[in-house]
């Protein structure tokens, strides 16, 4: 799914829960970091620890991230930040437009994705997004590691005296990511899944499971257009006849079509795995969040 439409609505600009509930001042002595989403903000918090203050523009677990419209306050936050972190790849274009100075240190996740990501070969849609490329790289553990390492380098340049701390934090974070990689690698071989949207594409790919979601269905959901009758019938058939081992459902952008699929999956006793685009309420760390999603996916694929 991409931020493909005019980004409308508003979400509160708040600090990550892990950073405290009050807005830190620029004279706090900590490095000011602004992230497009609390997912990337949580990665930077893991690297920077107590040496950083992280603010995320998108962190409402009940909202659709694609409905976000930046505000003047957002621009001010980005302007004052020492480091900005965002997804890229067409996902959070609104954030990239807020960066007005070439001097601003930044980490963009999408270009750091490893070479197993598919090449950009498709035709962009009216919004300029190429749907042959999956930009949801926070579900790619390899890319997350690369983002953490890049952030450590940037933070180390901003605070050389803390460089060793950032490197140690990154090493600890990476070790836990590698544990997750080992846990999920190959667990889905010989299994099939369908997804309401290709949010967890890279994680599913890591499991070895085959995603048999009809392309026309995925495209329609991503473009927020009507799902072709044939594609919907195919999805219903896959679920109702239990030809798949799990349904992966993005709970942040549900509609009547996806809700209907979830109901059909439950009626057919097909496991439903919920995935999200931002950290759920009460979850402050990337590793905690991803561990729970890996556990749910593992349980579904082994059922």
Image: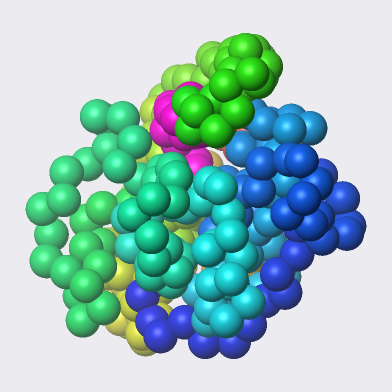
Residue 42 image offset from top left, x and y in percent: 67, 42
Q: Quadrant of the N terminus?
A: bottom left
Residue 268 image offset from top left, x and y in percent: 62, 57
The residue positioned 60% from the left and 28% from the top of the image is 159
Is residue 89 shown in magenta?
A: no
The residue positioned 70% from the left and 70% from the top of the image is 13
Residue 105 image offset from top left, x and y in percent: 44, 45
Left of 190 or right of it: where is 172? right
Choose between 261 and 66: the one closer to the eye. 66
Q: Does residue 292 appear anywhere in the picture?
A: no
Q: Is residue 162 above or below residue 254?
A: above
Q: Quadrant of the C terminus?
A: top right
Choose between 283 and 243: the one closer to the eye. 283
Left of 16 or right of it: where is 174? left
Q: Does residue 208 appear anywhere in the picture?
A: yes
Which residues are the magenta region? 138-151
The residue positioned 45% from the left and 20% from the top of the image is 186
**Quarter occupied by residue 14:** bottom right
């Amino acid at each position: 799914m991409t931020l493909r439409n005019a980004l409308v609505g508003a979400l509160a600009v708040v600090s990550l829960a892990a950073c405290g509930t009050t807005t830190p001042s620029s004279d706090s002595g900590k490095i000011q970091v602004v992230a497009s989403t609390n997912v990337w903000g949580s990665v930077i918090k893991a690297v920077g620890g107590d040496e950083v203050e992280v603010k995320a523009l998108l962190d409402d677990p009940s909202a659709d991230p694609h409905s976000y419209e930046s505000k003047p306050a957002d621009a001010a936050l980005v302007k004052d930040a020492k480091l900005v972190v965002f997804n890229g790849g067409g996902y959070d274009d609104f954030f990239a437009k807020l960066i007005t100075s070439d001097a601003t240190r930044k980490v963009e996740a999408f270009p750091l994705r490893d070479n197993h990501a598919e090449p950009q070969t498709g035709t962009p849609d009216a919004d300029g997004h190429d749907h042959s490329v999956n930009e949801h790289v926070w579900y790619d553990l390899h890319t997350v590691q690369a983002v953490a390492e890049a952030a450590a380098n940037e933070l180390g340049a901003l605070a050389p005296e803390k460089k060793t701390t950032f490197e140690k934090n990154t090493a600890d974070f990476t070790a836990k990511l590698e544990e997750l990689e080992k846990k999920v690698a190959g667990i889905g071989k010989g299994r099939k899944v369908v997804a309401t949207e290709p949010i967890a594409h890279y994680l599913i790919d890591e499991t070895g499971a085959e995603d048999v979601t009809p392309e026309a269905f995925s495209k329609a959901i991503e473009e927020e257009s009507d799902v072709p009758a044939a594609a919907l019938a195919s999805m219903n058939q896959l679920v109702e006849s239990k030809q798949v081992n799990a349904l992966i459902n993005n709970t942040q952008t549900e509609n009547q079509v996806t809700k209907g699929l979830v109901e059909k999956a439950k009626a057919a006793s097909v496991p439903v795995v919920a995935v999200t685009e931002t950290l759920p309420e009460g979850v402050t760390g990337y590793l905690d969040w991803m561990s729970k999603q890996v556990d749910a996916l593992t349980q579904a694929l082994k059922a």
